[in-house]
Image: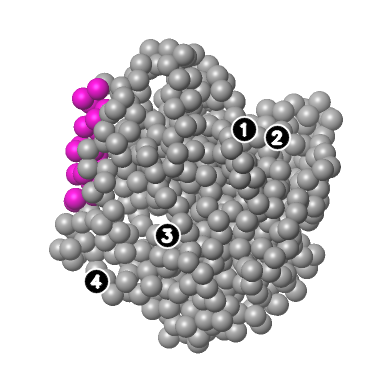
Amino acid sequence: MASPRNPLQTALTRRALLGAGMATTAMAVTGRAGEALAQASGPGPDAGSAFALEEATLAELQRRLRTGEETSRGLTEKYLARIGVLDPRLRCVLETNPEALAQAEARDRERKAGAELGPLHGIRVLLKDNIATRDRMHTTAGSLALVESTVPADAFVVTRLRAAGAVLLGKATLSEWANFRSDPSSSGWSGRGGQCLNPYVLDRSPSGSSSGSAVAVATNLCTVAVGTETDGSIVSPSAANGLVGLKPTVGLVSRSGIVPIAHTQDTAGPMTRTVRDAALLLAVLAAGDPADPASARPGAPRTPVDYAGALDPGALRGARIGVPRPEFFGYSPAADALAEEALGVLRDAGATLIDPAPVPNANHLGEPELEVLLYEFKADLDVYLRGLGGSGPRSLEELIAFNRTNASVEMPYFGQETFLKAQAKGPLTDAAYRKALATCRRLSTREGIDAVMNRHRLDALVAPTQGPAWLIDLVNGDSAAGGSSRPAAVAGYPSITVPVGQAHGLPVGLSFFGRAFSEARLLALAYAFEQAAPHRQPPRFLATAPLTAG
């Protein structure tokens, strides 16, 4: 078994290597999340000052680049400066890329030579820190255990982004190990980054596990970001931070080079401020990967799809949309009220609502899903860790030992109960695993989403993504009351959340979900809703929620 390294010594080594680029996370690496909350007593440091690129879309930035109004290097410098101002408080960027400016300069040379590679050419993208980059950045899943490890290659999605001319701005923080270490965890907390904050109301959770990706996009620290989801980890933080978040069908976007939880549910996906930007980013990320068996899933597109071309402001006319009211309403009065207003918008835009349209078995997926995730986490993570270079744990068993040895910085607030449950599981040939997997597939697909959509001839289902963000609580962990991500997550089907309004200054999202590989249709419906009722608002960095009526 590899001997665990001292994480504070490791952190100091990492800072020395990265120099000024790591200044924004120097305090965060101690894991003292309470310090950040203690400082969050007022508006953000530049809440009252204008940012020249506030809410800029991919199309707007490309226009500025084409006209010469901006250069990719100049844009990158502006975003890096904004990170330097805001991130010491928000803790959403674990590290900036030492090669970002060089990449931007290369994009400027390409443009000057007449080469333009598409809508991401010269655009800054942040990556969740479980997505491998074979460069001077780290890939740690937020854990100090992997700071001295090296990855064998770029993740496939990173290869796609580089080929599209994107500038990799840095790595975004996340709920450590994608929130699969302990049940009473605090979303957005990691040993490497400390506690990430919600920029709308600083004492509220950013949700997770793609916490930093969401906060960075919401606060205009980057143009777009890539998150990952197993169950809720894209759509939940996107909803909590007033974003569009798209969880693709498992198999549409490669998982190669992404720190795993479970191969039957894991996927990467776009986190953006508009539906159009999500469609443009998805077109870059979506591609078959020979190294990822899910790419051969039946129904996966064999040729590139123009997702942005499918967007239509009139897409809701004649659409049949189901409302799974019994399962996904009733846990949050605020979310219910905003969702009811949204249903009115859908009707006025010409959609036919089937209300209620219950999703059979939606409330019976939790137990078998957890069983599958525990088995697959142990198997998949052991394979991933064995493929790393450098030093650090090479199995879940060694990772558990590292956390015990370094409990003061890795487990100051919550433990690793989920790790221990996973480690106790046997191989994927166990009858218990095979039974749980079969149950999940049956209940979520042909006896779940497919059943209700077939019965009512639906284009999509729609429900509140979740309620407003909860208070950060490092003692008791998250206190989210409910959400609608599970059926699509367990089925491996797509879902997209869009802003639907705010309650007490906290964003709320509305999710559209449906059949496998129906991303183009879901994006069109979400776009039509966004155009009819645009609810995206930049954050105000409130110290606490204004708990007044309305």
Answer with mark 1 or mark 2, whichever residue precedes in sequence: 2
State how far apart marks 4 and 2 are (Cα).
48 Å
Q: Closer to the camera: disc 4 or disc 1?
A: 1
The residue wearing badge 1 is: 536
Pointer 3 or 1: first along the chain: 3
Residue 113 visible in the picture: no
Question: Mark number for residue 260?
Answer: 3
Dot 1 and dot 2 residues touching (CB under 8 Å): yes
Contact between labelled residues 2 and 4, with CB atoms less than 8 Å apart:
no
Amino acid type assigned to the residue bearing label 3 in the image: Pro
Name the spot of residue 14 as percent of width and height, x first: 68, 72
Which label lies toward us, 4 or 2? 2
Q: CA distance from mark 3 to mark 1?
A: 31 Å
SS category of the residue bearing label 1: loop
Q: Amino acid at mark 4?
A: Gly
Reply above or below: 37 against 155.
below
Whether residue 393 is visible: yes
* Residue drawn at 65 percent across, 52 percent down: 544
Category of crowding for the residue at label 2, using alpha-carbon neighbours closer than 10 angstroms: few (below 14), some (14–19), many (at least 20) = some
**Is residue 497 magenta-colored?**
no
Q: Position of residue 106 (x, y in %)?
A: 75, 45
Q: Which is nearer the eye, 94 or 413?
A: 413
Look at label 1 and name its amino acid: Arg
Name the secondary structure under disc 2: loop
Q: Amino acid at mark 2?
A: Glu
Q: Which mark is residue 55?
A: 2
* Residue at 62%, 51% in the rendered image: 198
Q: Toward which corner of the image does residue 203 lie, by quadrant?
A: bottom right
Write the residue at 32% across / 43% down. 487
Residue ID for mark 4: 426
